Amino acid sequence: MAKRLKDVDAVMVGMGWTGSILARELTKAGLNVVGLERGADRVPGEDFILPAVRDELRYSNRLELMWDNSTDTLTFRNFPSEHALPMRRIGAFLPGEGVGGSGIHWGGLHWRFLPSDFRIRTALSERYGANAIPDDMTIQDWPLSYDELEPYYDHFDKICGVSGQAGNLRGTKIDGGNVLEGPRSDHYPNKPIKTSVAGMMFRDAAKNLGYHPFPMPISIASAAYKNAEGVTLGACEYCGFCNRTACETNAKASPNSTILPVLRLEPKFELRSRCWVTKLLYDKDTKKVTGVLYTDLRNGEEYEQPAGIVVLSSYVFGNVQHMLLAGIGEPYDHATGKGVVGKNYAYQFEAGGVAFFADKHMNSYMGSAGTGMCIDDFNGENFDHAGLGFFGGGYFSCNTPTSPPISGRMVPPGTARWGSEWKRETVKWYNHACRFGTEGSVYSNRDNYLELDPTYKDAFGRPLIRLTYNGTDNDHKMSHYLLSKLETIIKAMGPTQYRMEPRPRNFSIVPYQSTHNTGGTMMGSDPKSSVVNRYLQAWDAHNLFVVGASVFPQQHGYNPTGTVGALAYWSAKAITTTYLKNPGPLVHA
């Protein structure tokens, strides 16, 4: 029998970026908030300190900050006709676990979607004709515009201390920035991170070909910075350890370094780590969630936490699983195309290349994830798709990979994979190689979706999420086109040799590709075609708010975190200024 606890005003199910943002904003509004996190607590001054934090084996290879597949995982298949099997070891994507979630170990690339991305179905129909959109492409317009979200993009920039160069300031184009981006209301909080040798070579080659290169926008402070919460971030030390690990100088923004320092001091907030939420308590008659059930992993005891507001702020798969287990919203049925929960799962279609320059010294070890350069000329509707046979696109990037000792060893095509030859080649080319990437969009397809698995269960006996996903013809055509354009830039850089790395035909769950999972609880204007409304409020439970990338109707050609954070602030504003005054649906169907 679960022990019933004292009522609170709001409870967060997950304490990563979105849980931290919502908890902070709701406590500012006077609410008593409990944050539940199934993983361990993580405090920068205690857990992210030298020398322990610079441990590639511990973090990059053994994945200490990531999802624990021994207690929870998902099942995967490429096609609906296949039998899905459990993902026993995380590989293709690396969700974080513990306070801060994936916001601790991300590389920090911080983007905004294009204005046309928010009205993509309408934009494609207007430009190419409604019949041009394939029947199996289930993309939707977002229920809000870029202009509506822009102030929240700007605020999240200032929380994270983003470093970058504006290219469109209130409609005025600025050379050297991304002139193809949507209008910004302000400059980036910090100047760009230093550019690598490879980045400068890419910039020059791209510019000579008529493109518009600009420095990567990144949530790593190029100088000491006090953010919008009054928390000071340190300056980047270009240590070479960004991805898959934390930052000992607090230069890389994370919930732990930007919001939690002040949230932990708030008397109205209580953080409970190692507490696994197993069930949303849903009253279908009143269309309300009354609270959550959770198990304290330290003692095995089960608790009921009643709450006036419940915020689903876990990772994409967790948000979808909670909704399906609680029976909130109609589950997506692939056979009929009906239902919404689990629909429009999307990923990121990344592909790239590696180039080797015998006459260039690139210092591959030192740097950060943001020392490269980008172009946005082939992203979204920044270019004409007429006659190309696909929709979508992505940005291109070039960087030396801040190569750590174990994994950062690029060698030319044909090199032996081990032994004396490999040793010679890795020494020869270590400081003479750079990596290129295309961050391709994934436009939702009816055959890619999430549901409860009928066979496999987690540590608490709940059905695992079953992921059915594969790259579509549209994805592959889009990616091949991007790679062909990228290859012209690589050739213009004059490499000694290079190789392109296209995506294989069928998606594999094994090698790492991207942690950019989206969809499954998509936002929209109609409860028949979405799970949450424009304020991220569940259509079928007015006191339940779902935040994170699970609300994306599709994945565009950018890293999702900038939009995830902006949407969290957008939702928090609606809750604190409107919902609290008159609890009920914020949008009427």
Image (tube, rainbow, N blue to C red):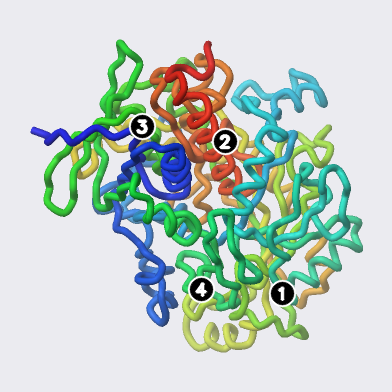
Counting residues from the start of the chain, the first of labels 4 and 1 encountered is: 1
Q: Is residue 470 visible?
A: no
Q: CA distance from mark 2 to mark 4?
A: 29 Å
Q: Position of residue 339 (x, y in %)?
A: 45, 18
Amino acid, disc 3: Val
- Residue under circle 1? 196
Mark 4 or 1: the one toward you: 4
Amino acid, disc 2: Trp
> Which labelled disc corresponds to residue 346?
none
Amino acid, disc 4: Thr
Mark 4 nearby-residue class (10 Å; few <14, some 14–19, many ≥20)? some
Q: Residue at x 82, y 48 (%)?
A: 168
Q: Is residue 491 above or below residue 450?
A: below
Q: CA distance from mark 1 to mark 2?
A: 35 Å
Q: Is residue 533 above or below residue 275?
A: above
- Residue under circle 3? 310
- Residue under circle 2? 570
Q: Nearer the viewer, residue 394 or 504?
A: 394
Q: Residue at x 31, y 50 (%)?
A: 271
Q: Is residue 444 left or right of residue 324?
A: right
Q: Is residue 281 left or right of residue 449?
A: left
Q: Position of residue 9 (x, y in %)?
A: 33, 33
Q: CA distance from mark 4 to mark 1?
A: 21 Å
Cβ–Cβ below 8 Å for labels 1 and 3?
A: no
Q: CA distance from mark 2 to mark 3?
A: 17 Å
- Residue under circle 4? 249
Q: Is residue 505 above or below residue 497?
A: above
Q: Residue at x 60, y 76 (%)?
A: 238
Disc 4 on helix, strand or loop? loop
